[in-house]
Image (cartoon, rainbow, N blue to C red):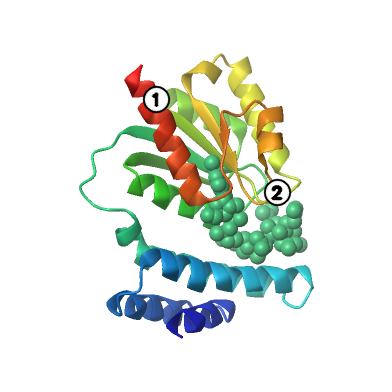
Amino acid sequence: MILNDISLSLQQGKAKEVRLLVQNAILQGILACDILDNGLITGMQIIGAKFKRNEVFVPEVLIAARAMNAGLEILRPILVSSGVKFIGKALICTVKGDLHDIGKNLVKMMFEGQGIECIDLGVDVESETILQAVRDHSPDILCLSALLATTMVEQKEVILALEKAGLRSQVKVLVGGAPVNLEYANEIHADGYAPDAASAAELARALLLQRSSR
Ligand code: B1M
């Protein structure tokens, strides 16, 4: 019931209510992954379907996204267990031209939950900024999120730019986002693809452990 209320409040863009409902759901002992999957993500999927059918428009979607991020922030301390020793470092961003950040934020939380330190470059990030951050921070993993069919090509551009700059071998590149799939990831020579945040974190952890066992 409360999960349905979370989904409804999110669809209505009521960030304060979403925050309170998520807090209550936690107090009721509902698992964070249930709150995430059956409350927040369900609500956002419904908004997404309505957006596609032109039943809601960008402003409504934007306030729903704010409500989603508000709910995610409450879940953050649970998804990211404290006191974990970092096993590696990741750089994460949404690529140039793309403003969608909810999936990226979720990937970041799941990474942190797996003990992977994250440097978040934000959204709409130019490849030159990413290259400079790779030079500055020497991450083990670079995570590129893209939500638009028109921006997924930027993932390829970043990989090409890394090659050109002689940085490609220094970092494993993982790609994801709704329009991306494994076939595309292979085509652009990414090191990995994950369909959701939890599998992205598992994949990253596996890559890091593989590296340290060598
Ligand atoms: Co946008 N939008 N949007 N939007 N929006 C989509 C993506 C769209 C599918 C809606 C639709 O038409 N049905 C469509 C894209 C179509 C396409 O190209 N294939 C679309 C469009 C067209 C647009 C605009 C062009 C609309 C316009 O202006 N006319 C515009 C573009 C702006 C821009 O970026 N330049 C636009 C704008 C917006 C808002 C700003 C209003 C808002 C974003 C706010 C924000 O993020 N702060 C927004 C939203 C919210 C959506 C929908 C409704 C929801 C996206 C979302 O957050 N989902 C979306 C429709 C939909 O997805 N059903 C839509 C929840 C989130 C948890 O899922 O981000 O997919 P997702 O992340 C998943 C996985 O993809 C994966 O993990 C997550 C799950 O665990 N993942 C990764 C993500 N990144 C990963 C990286 C990894 C691994 C996994 O690295 C390894």
User: Between residues 79 and 167, which one lies in front from this camera angle?
Assistant: 79
- Indicate the secondary structure of the residue bearing disc 1: helix
Q: Ligand 1: does it lie within 8 Å of the C-beta at label 2?
A: yes
Indicate the quadrant where residue 157 lies. Answer: top right
Q: Quadrant of the C terminus?
A: top left
Which residue: 79% across, 72% down? 53
Secondary structure of the residue carrying tag 2 is loop
Instruction: Determine crowd level at label 1: few under 14, some 14-19, many 20+ residues with C-alpha closer than 10 A.
Output: few
Query: Splitting the image into 4 quarters, where does residue 27 fall?
Result: bottom left
Q: Which residue is mark 2?
A: 179
Residue farthest toward the left in the current orientation of the protein = 83
First-in-chain label (1 vs 2): 2
| Three-letter code for the amino acid on which mark 1 is drawn | Gln
Above or below, comparing residue 138 to residue 185 in the picture: above
Identify whether 54 is placed above or below 78.
below
Q: Quadrant of ligand 1?
A: bottom right
- Residue at 36% over, 78% down: 25
